[in-house]
Amino acid sequence: MLNLYRRHQPPCRYASRRYRNCNCPIWVQGSLRGEYIRRALDLRSWSAATDLARDWEAAGEIGVVKKPDIPTIAEAVERFLADVKAQQLSGETIRKYENLLNRRFLPWCESKGLRYLKQLGVEEMRQFRAGWTDSANYATKNLERLRAFFRFCMHDDWIARNPARAVKAPKVTDTPTLPFSRAEIKRIVDACDRYAGNQDRLRAFVLVMRHSGLRIGDTIGLAEDRIKGNKLLLYTAKTGTPVYVPLPPVVMESLQKIGPATNGRFFSTGNAKPQTARSNWSRYLDSLFELANIQGGHSHRFRDTFAVELLLAGTPLESVSVLLGHSSVKITEKHYKPWVRSLQRKLEQEVQRAWGAA
């Protein structure tokens, strides 16, 4: 029989082996099938040590663990990430899952001595979240990713319930959509002529973002084969229908002037990692915003400008949602509802002016 006890060390003030609620090293002592053992387990979690001792007893040999039918936490993460890649999700989405699970979740589990999924409950997930230093918005996204991982585990019958589901997301205060004004866009484009780097390349980048609504990562990876005449392929809808946006002549001229690189992309050689390329282009834009004297400049404001200009021109919210690639029109309404109301007021004023002309 194997017995566990804590070997108390300074500055721990306890001496009795019966006391377990400290963080001192756990030792095992006893015999199993005639083999005697008395040694440290290199564990500080009592539940993890208990599981290990039971595994040895089940195997009938000290140091031998029979592989359980249910995978360990690390194995479950590995299988989940393999499934995510098999779904052919975007590289950025996969990177975020890997960053959360491989670089944050697994090291945290290891530090707590947690090896099996059954050891993860709601309280453990609250403790894990308590160590996050992310913004409220990013923490909410990470909590959604954590819930997705445990849903995967539930579907494979490895766990009975999702421990991350009961963890409440932090309160997110949505910042209002703030598109660039037309005067600001003009200052930004004009400032390209004073930029110390590749002016033509930066101007083309800005014009593409403004007139396509692409996110910065998608703009960086823009390939020549996505340009069909004067139209840009935004994406292919789930129905298999391609979604195009026409580009004005000024955008086409700027792209033709710089031309694609040898890899067929306009703004990336493909040598840098996506995160590095994104950081570089964000830095270029920050310098441009400073030259143009733009307060609160950010790449996503080009996308906001694209959407708001469409709404002010009378484009239905549903059409704007399709062009932005939102999975639901509710997402579009959430971000751009104030501008829809302003459009409604504009229409009402036009109707009222027509009364006087009658």
Image (spheres, helix red, strand yellow):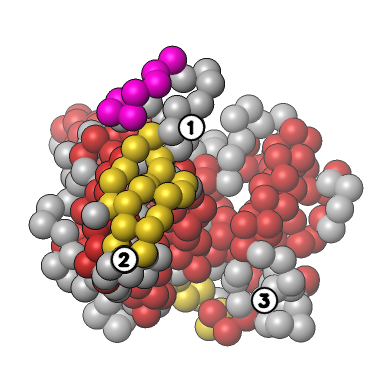
Q: Who comes first in sequence, dot 1 or dot 3?
A: 1
Residue 12 visible in the current orientation: yes
Whole-angstrom CA distance, mark 1 to mark 3, is 36 Å
Coordinates of residue 45 in the picture (x, y in percent): 36, 41
Q: What stretch is highlighted in magenta?
A: 13-19
SS under mark 2: loop
Tell me which residue sits at (40%, 55%) in the image.
37
Q: Name the residue under label 2.
A: 34
| Left or right: 296 as drawn, with respect to 78 | right
Along the line of sight, the residue nearer the viewer: 234 or 351? 234
CA separation, marks 2 and 1? 51 Å
In the depicted structure, whether residue 161 falls above or below residue 293: below
Q: Quadrant of residue 46?
A: top left
Residue with the mark numbered 1: 133
Q: Under tag 3, what secondary structure?
A: loop
Mark nearer the N terminus (2 vs 3) = 2
Q: Mark 3 points at which residue?
A: 265
* Residue 112 appearing in the image: no
Label 3 crowd bin: few (<14), some (14–19), many (20+), radius 10 Å: some
The residue lying at 76 percent from left, 83 percent from top is: 262
Look at label 1 and name its amino acid.
Thr
In the image, is residue 117 part of the stretch drawn in magenta? no
Q: Which mark is residue 13?
A: none
* Image side of residue 20 versus residue 278, left or right: left
Give the residue at x 76% y 40%: 287
Using the image as rendered, state which of residue 271 and residue 95 is in the foreground: 95
Q: Which of marks 2 and 1 is in front?
A: 2
Q: In which quarter of the image is the N terminus?
A: bottom left
Of the numbered discs 2 and 1, the one sitting upstream in the chain is 2
Mark nearest the camera among 1 and 3 is 1
